[in-house]
Amino acid sequence: MTLYRLIYVSQAIAGLEYPDLVDIAEKSEHNNKNVGITGMLTFGDSMFLQVLEGSRRLISQTYNRILMDKRHNNAELIDFSEIEHRDFGLWSMKVVQLGTQAEICDIILKYSSSETFSPISMTGKQSLSFLRELTALYQRGGNFN
Ligand code: FAD
């Protein structure tokens, strides 16, 4: 099967709260597991950055459904590529709320002009590297949820 990767950024609606993130995480894990989609969803400073990996058809269906969700808006596609292998295959969807932990701030700063999480300013390559570094941090036992 040819594998694809999709990365997009979007803005959370005002008033989005932790239970919303929990709901999104639960739905995503459940739905994605059923269709073989893997990935990571990061949330910080009212912005979402998400990567989805899987078949082109199933990624497209999932992305179209995500775009309809009223809990975010102003989605912008950052990357859609054919890939050799998955980078986020550990998770049907790992949801990471970016906090103020030093290690996470360092990774944000590495790919941004400041420590404010602004994925809208990242290139496709930067956003992928950012997400890969978060994964590596997690695998080293880093301090995030
Ligand atoms: P239901 O949960 O029954 O939802 C039916 C409809 O109601 C959908 O249109 C849904 O968008 C909307 N809805 C549900 N709950 C709320 C709420 N609290 N407020 C407003 N509208 C609501 N889903 C995935 O399957 N995979 C993903 O990787 C994924 N990533 C997401 C990333 C982001 C940033 C967001 C905001 C949502 C994401 N979702 C993801 C959720 C997705 O948008 C749908 O809500 C979900 O897939 C629908 O699940 P369901 O089929 O069980 O329908």
Image (cartoon, rainbow, N blue to C red):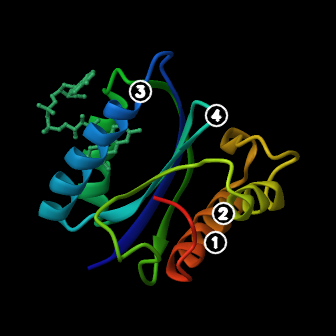
Q: Which residue is mark 1?
A: 133
Q: Which residue is located at x 59 percent, y 71 percent?
A: 132
* Quadrant (top left/top right/bottom left/bottom right) for the N terminus: bottom left
Residue under label 2: 130
User: Which secondary structure, mark 4?
Assistant: loop
Q: Quadrant of residue 44?
A: top right
Above or below residue 28? Residue 46 is above
Per the model, the C-alpha gap separating discs 4 and 3 is: 12 Å
Q: Tell me the mark number nearer the camera, choosing from 4 and 2.
A: 4
Q: CA separation, marks 4 and 1?
A: 19 Å
The quarter of the picture where residue 33 lies is: bottom left
Ligand 1, by image quadrant, is top left
Amino acid carrying label 4: it is Asp
Q: Is residue 114 left or right of residue 22?
A: right
Q: Amino acid at mark 2?
A: Phe
SS type, badge 3: loop
Q: What residue is pinned by disc 3?
A: 17
Mark 3 in CB contact with mark 1 (< 8 angstroms): no
Residue underneath mark 4: 45
- SS of the residue at dot 2? helix
Quarter occupied by the C terminus: bottom left
